[in-house]
Image: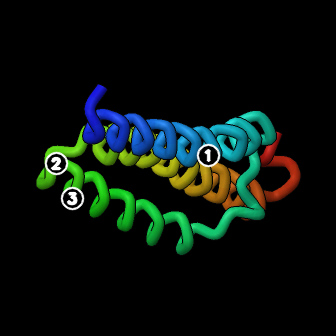
Amino acid sequence: MNSIDWVEALGLLAGAQTTIAFLPQALKVWRAKSADDISLATFLIFCSGVTCWFFYGLFIDSLSVILANAVTLVLAAAIVWLKVKYTRRKSMGASCSPDESR
C-alpha cells in the first residue's frame, strides 16, 4: 500500500468511528419512541454541515469523506425525522380530551 492508500484507510477508519457514534442515539430514540431530549435545531444544523461535507467529498473525490458523511447523514436525518414524528404525536395526544385519546 502506498502512502495515499494509508491516508484513505485512516479516513475510512475515522469516518466509521464517528458515524457509528450516532447509532446508539438513533436506536435509543427509536426504541423509547421519544426524542424529548434531542434539540431539533442542533440536528438540523448538523445535517446541513454533514451535507456540505458530503458534497465536499464528492468534489475532492474522497471515498472516506463521501461514505462517512453519507451514512452519518442518514442516521442524523433519521433522528430528525423521529424527533418530528414523536413531537407531533405527543402534541396531537395532548390536544385531545381524555376520551378522544383512546
Residue name at image x 53 percent, y 64 percent: 43
Q: CA–CA distance between discs 3 and 2?
A: 5 Å
Indicate left or right for 34 with 68 as reference: right
Q: Does label 3 or label 1 sit earlier along the sequence?
A: 1
Which image quadrant is residue 7 in? top left
Q: Amino acid at mark 2?
A: Leu
Residue name at image x 78 percent, y 48 percent: 100
Per the image, the residue denoted by label 2 is: 58
Helix, strand or loop under label 2: helix
The mark lying in front, picked from 1 and 2, is: 2
Q: Amino acid at mark 1?
A: Phe
Q: Which mark is residue 22?
A: 1
Q: CA–CA distance between discs 1 and 2?
A: 22 Å
Q: Is residue 47 above or below residue 8?
A: below
Q: Amino acid at mark 3?
A: Tyr
Q: Cβ–Cβ below 8 Å for labels 1 and 2?
A: no
